[in-house]
Every structure is written in C-alpha cells, then in structure tokens.
C-alpha cells in the first residue's frame, strides 16, 4: 500500500502527466454523460422493451460496447462502432487498393490522409446504420412526443453527430491525453455495466440456501485466473534474435552488434479482431433466416443452433472461425517480406539465416507456428463466457469471463499503464511494478 501511495504521488508530481490524466478522465466523463442523454422526441419511460431486448445476442453485444447507450436510445447509441467498422474496412482495402497502400508508406502525411478518409467513411457507415436503429426503436413501440417523420429526420442527424462527437473525443484523448482514445471509450463503455453485473451476481449467490458465499468466492477466483491468462496472451511474444554487421551510435560506427537485438513476434498479433469478425459471421445465418421467412425444419434447426450461445455447435463453429480469422488477420497485420527488407536495408540478419527471401520465409514459418497456439488460446477465451453461463453465472457477469470485453479491457489497461510507466521512468521515478516491467504492446480495439 505504501508503494502504491508513493507511485500516485510521483504521478501527481509530473505536471504534464497529471494534466494528461485529468484531461482523459474529463473527456471520458463527458462521453459517459452523453451516453445517458435520450434522443429528442422519445419518452424515456417507454424504453423498457428495448432494454429487455439488449440482454443477449448482437443487441446485447452492441449495448455492452456502448455502455448501455444502445438500450437507452441515447444520442450516442451507435457509439464509436461505426468508426471501428470504417477502420477495419480501410485496413482491408490496404491489401487490395494501390492508392491506400501508397498512403500507408508515406509516413505522417499518408496517415493524415487515411485518417481523413476513415472519418468520411465513418459518417457514411453511421448514415447506413442509423435507419436500422431507428426502425428497431419504432418496432419496440417506443412512445414519441413528436411526429414520426420529424423523429426520423432529427434522429438521423443526432445519431450521426453523436458518433462524430465520440470519434472527436477519442482523437482528443489520443492526441492530448493518455492512452488510445478510441480503445478507452470502448473500455469505459464495457466497464460501465460491471458494477451492476457484479452486485446482481453477488446478490443471487447470497440468496441461495447453503454454499452461496463459497460459490461466489470460487467465481471471483476463476475470474482472476482468466484475467491472468488474458494478460499472458496479450503480452506473449516470440523473440527472434537479430545481429547487425554495422551499428551507428553516438556518431561512431561499430563493427558487429554491441548488444543482441530481437524481433518480437506476438503470439496473438491479430488482437481481438478475429472474435469481432467471427461474431459478425455467426449472426448472418440467423439474420437471413429471420427475414427470409423460411419455416422448414432444417431452417429452424440452424436458427436454433446459431442462436444458442451456450450450445455445442454455436461454440464449436465460433471457435473454428476465430482460429481461421486469426491466421487471416495476422497475415494482414504482419508483413514478413517488409520486415526482411528492412533488416537487410539496415545491415541486420538473423543468425544462421540468409538475408532477403530466406529471412522472410523463416519469419513466416515462426509466425505460423506461434499463431496456432495463440489462435487456439484466443478461441478458448472467446467461448469461456458460455461455460460461465452453464456453470450458473448470470449472463451480464459471464461476459467478463472472456471474449471481446475481457481482451479489450486487459489490452487497454496494459497500454495505458505502459505509457504512464514510461513517463515515470523518464523522470527517474520507479515504475509501476516492483520488479520487471510492462512489456509488449497492448491489444488495440481497432
């Protein structure tokens, strides 16, 4: 406790870090307040059906990411998700569109152009998603205080403005605050439901006759272990040794490497994106069958299987998709050919491996080998909430036992702590940990 208090004092002594943290907390507070402002023209007391709809499925997932704003019919009901979708589209287009590939190689100027394209694409996606959300509101018999036509127009404008404002808040946090702003907004939305879910789970266990307290302690211990496993997955790397023929330091050129360097290949280079992709794919069959009006026995069996998140076939297909998408997204994120070229250009080489194409093949082989256990581990973490529900944990609290929510929270917390520790070490203070250090790059939300 004494060391913790000293660390807080050291953080407070650094004026720049203090201002960044206070600014970040202030902008996050603004985001949370905006998430509770209901769309103009809606009677808040008529949102009961919408809130009950958000207990599971894709609606529950979206509601969790927006911190309850989706079920509250908030001005930020769509949250930051359109921006995430736009970022994913731009990343995928970077593989096929030469113009975007060129921008990605132009440094800072190219990054600005890509950010601008992403913003415009975010607006387009929001305009595409807003009618669906408004139609869903209308189907829930939400009471309106204005005419439906006016409500449609104003809601389209307000929802788009809410997403743009959330995007602006995230960018301001990234530029002026601490941590990745977009990821922090998602994390705060996820954590917002944690206290209520925790209290509900505790109350349900204490109401049981005999063994309720013991079960609750076991659940918390299991959650602690799952968090440790998630941290291990986020930080796990395979270090590939690298040596340099010549190194320049302090204006002098040294023959050979002064110290052995490493290329850190992440075991889970894809982050949470495979889970997001897999979840999107899992909802497609149910959506098609629901709106197609098919009533055959086989269609009902498929719809039931893909709707039951605790069922065997749902979790089996979900896990297989995650493993496949992990390999796919890792191939997008990690360009082994570019890494080999950069090594060769800088006079570096992997001991025992020829520079150039042979190095790229070696890195690709290593990456494929470490991606397999990483993808399996990621798939296991993704389906753990289903096992928690089967074990008797309530649905809302079970979401924190794995899946996208847990990985985003762990990744964002590690990334933020890493930045804070860098400030402390640069000012000659002790880091956040008594021994060792925060290593690796945390999972980004996008």
Image: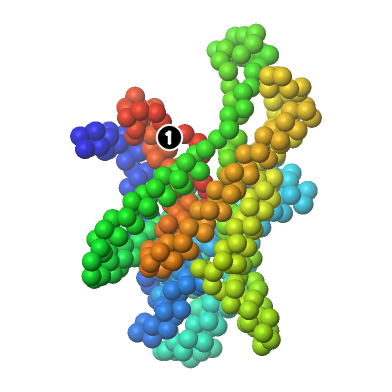
Residue 298, quarter of the rendered image: bottom right
The colour scheme used to paint the residues is rainbow
Instruction: Report the residue at 68% width, 40% height from top.
Output: 368
Instruction: Judge whether 78 appears above or below 434 on screen.
Output: below
Asked if one can make out residue 130 in the rendered structure from this viewpoint, the answer is: no
Residue 427 image point, x, y percent: 35, 27
Q: Which residue shows up at 55% across the image and 35% down it?
A: 237
Residue 390: x and y, percent? 44, 66
As drawn, the residue found furthest toward the bottom would be 147
Q: Residue 179 vs residue 321: left or right? A: left
| Local crowd size for mark 1, using a 10 Å CA cut-off: few (<14), some (14–19), many (≥20) | some
Say what secondary structure mark 1 lies in.
Answer: loop
Q: Determine whether 385 is above or below 297 in the image.
A: above
Front-lying residue, 420 or 16: 420
Left or right for 388, reference 131: left
- Who's the residue at 71% across and 19% down the image? 352
Q: Residue at x 66, y 39 (%)?
A: 369
Task: Say which residue label 1 marks.
Answer: 438
Task: Please name whichever residue, 442 or 246, is drawn nearer the observer in this view of the structure.
Answer: 442
In the rendered image, the residue lying farthest to the front is 210
**Residue 6, percent across and down?**
23, 33
Residue 242 visible (yes or no):
yes
Where residue 86 sits in the image (x, y, percent)?
A: 62, 59
């Amino acid at each position: 406790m004494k060391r913790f208090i000293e660390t807080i004092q050291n953080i407070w002594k650094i004026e720049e870090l203090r201002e960044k943290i206070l600014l970040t907390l202030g902008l996050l507070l603004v985001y949370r307040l905006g998430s509770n402002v209901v769309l103009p023209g809606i009677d808040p007391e008529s949102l009961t059906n919408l809130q009950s709809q958000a207990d599971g499925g894709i609606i529950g997932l979206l509601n969790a990411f927006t911190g309850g704003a989706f079920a509250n019919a908030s001005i930020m009901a769509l949250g930051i998700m359109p921006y995430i979708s736009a970022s994913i589209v731009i990343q995928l287009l970077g593989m096929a569109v030469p113009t975007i590939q060129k921008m990605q190689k132009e440094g800072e100027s190219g990054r600005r152009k890509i950010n601008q394209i992403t913003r415009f694409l975010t607006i387009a996606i929001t305009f595409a998603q807003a009618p669906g959300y408004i139609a869903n509101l209308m189907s829930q018999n939400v009471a309106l205080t204005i005419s439906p036509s006016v409500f449609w127009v104003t809601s389209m404008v307000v929802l788009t403005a809410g997403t743009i404002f959330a995007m602006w808040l995230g960018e301001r946090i990234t530029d002026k605050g601490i941590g990745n702003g977009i990821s922090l907004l998602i994390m705060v939305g996820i954590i917002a439901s944690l206290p209520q879910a925790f209290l509900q789970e505790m109350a349900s266990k204490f109401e049981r006759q005999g063994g309720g307290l013991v079960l609750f302690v076991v659940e918390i211990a299991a959650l602690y272990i799952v968090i440790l496993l998630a941290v291990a997955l986020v930080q796990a790397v395979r270090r590939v040794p690298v040596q340099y023929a010549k190194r320049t330091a302090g204006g002098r050129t040294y023959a050979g490497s002064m110290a052995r360097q490493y290329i850190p290949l992440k075991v889970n280079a894809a982050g949470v994106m495979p889970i997001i992709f897999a979840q999107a794919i899992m909802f497609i069959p149910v959506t098609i069958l629901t709106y197609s009006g098919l009533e055959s026995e086989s269609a009902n069996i498929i719809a039931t299987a893909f709707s039951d998140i605790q069922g065997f076939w749902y979790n089996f297909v979900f896990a297989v998709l995650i493993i496949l998408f992990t390999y796919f997204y890792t191939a997008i994120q990690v360009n082994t050919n570019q890494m080999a070229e950069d090594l060769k250009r800088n006079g570096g080489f992997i001991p025992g491996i020829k520079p150039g194409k042979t190095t790229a093949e070696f890195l690709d082989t290593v990456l494929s080998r470490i991606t397999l256990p990483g993808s399996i581990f990621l798939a296991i973490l993704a389906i753990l909430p289903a096992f928690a529900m089967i074990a008797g944990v309530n649905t809302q609290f079970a979401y924190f036992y794995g899946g996208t929510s847990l990985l985003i929270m762990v990744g964002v917390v590690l990334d933020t702590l890493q930045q804070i520790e860098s400030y402390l070490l640069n000012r000659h203070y002790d880091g956040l940990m008594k021994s060792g250090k925060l290593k690796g790059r945390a999972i980004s939300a996008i």
